[in-house]
Image (cartoon, grey):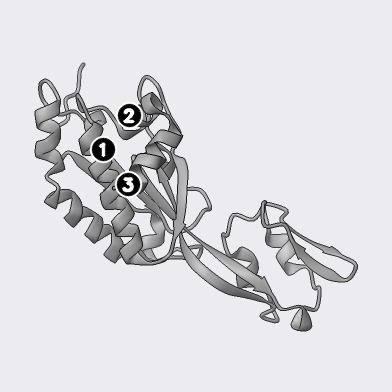
Amino acid sequence: MKKFFQVDKGFEIKGCFGLKGCPNAITKSENLIKKFEDILMKENITEFLKTKVKGPLKVHHKFKVALSECPNGCSQIYIADFALHGFLKFDVKEEICNLCGACIEVCEEEAIKIEENRLIVENEKCVGCGACVRVCPTGALKENFKGYKIYVGGKLGRHPRLATFLTVLDKEEDILNIFKKVLRFYKDKNIKGERLGTIIEKMGWESFVKILENY
């Protein structure tokens, strides 16, 4: 039996459990999600797609936005057209670190180690989940940045594509600005209702970034 789904909007926005008070949540993005929706409505994405797609809109035509409040495990951000996840950076205050090893035990990335009586953080391994900061008993690990990693161009379908990392931002104004730029690019380059990832693949990542910078 075939099942048919009514598509009342040409876009979809998904948040994660962090919106409901998850202890792993780094960011709180209810307000940001509402502003994404407002922008998508203002840009008339639904009506835009209706002019591009032959026949009725289907679920796979939607412009999809996903948001995770931490980097721990939300897979939706990697298959969305525009996505972001919260993360943080931290400093090590060596003068109050007692080398207890609590941070090492909790780090799933094995990004922290002790060498020559010093705590060493391998930043290239760290995903910014904040677990080490939360368990540090002395406060030696001190948060110095909280923001989002932005990803674009993810999709499933016949030719799946994982979203590509674009940039890091912390200010809401800058996040909304890059979102508007991505939407402008998507509308300008869209021919027949294809997903953003398809458009990026056709022109290449470097060309996409260069065009986006000029919007």
Give the mark nearer the N terminus: 1 vs 2: 1
Please give the name of the residue rendered at 29% of the width and 57% of the height, measured from the top-left corner.
Answer: 177
Where, quadrant-wise, is the N terminus in this rendering? top left
Q: Amino acid at mark 2?
A: Ile
x, y percentage for residue 45?
15, 41
Give the x, y percent position of residue 60.
26, 29
Residue drawn 53% across the image and 69% down it: 145
Residue wearing tag 3: 214
Q: What residue would you read off at disc 1?
A: 186
Q: Residues within 10 Å of mark 3 (few under 14, many from 20)?
A: few
Going 51% across and 48% down the picture, which residue do you hit?
73
**SS of the residue at dot 1?**
helix
* Front residue of 189 and 95: 189
Residue 83 is at least partly visible in this image: yes
Q: Which kind of residue does numbered mark 3 sit on?
A: Asn
- Left or right: residue 171 versus residue 38 is right
Residue 8 appears in the figure? no
Q: Secondary structure at mark 3?
A: loop
Q: Is the C-beta separation of discs 1 and 2 under 8 Å?
A: yes
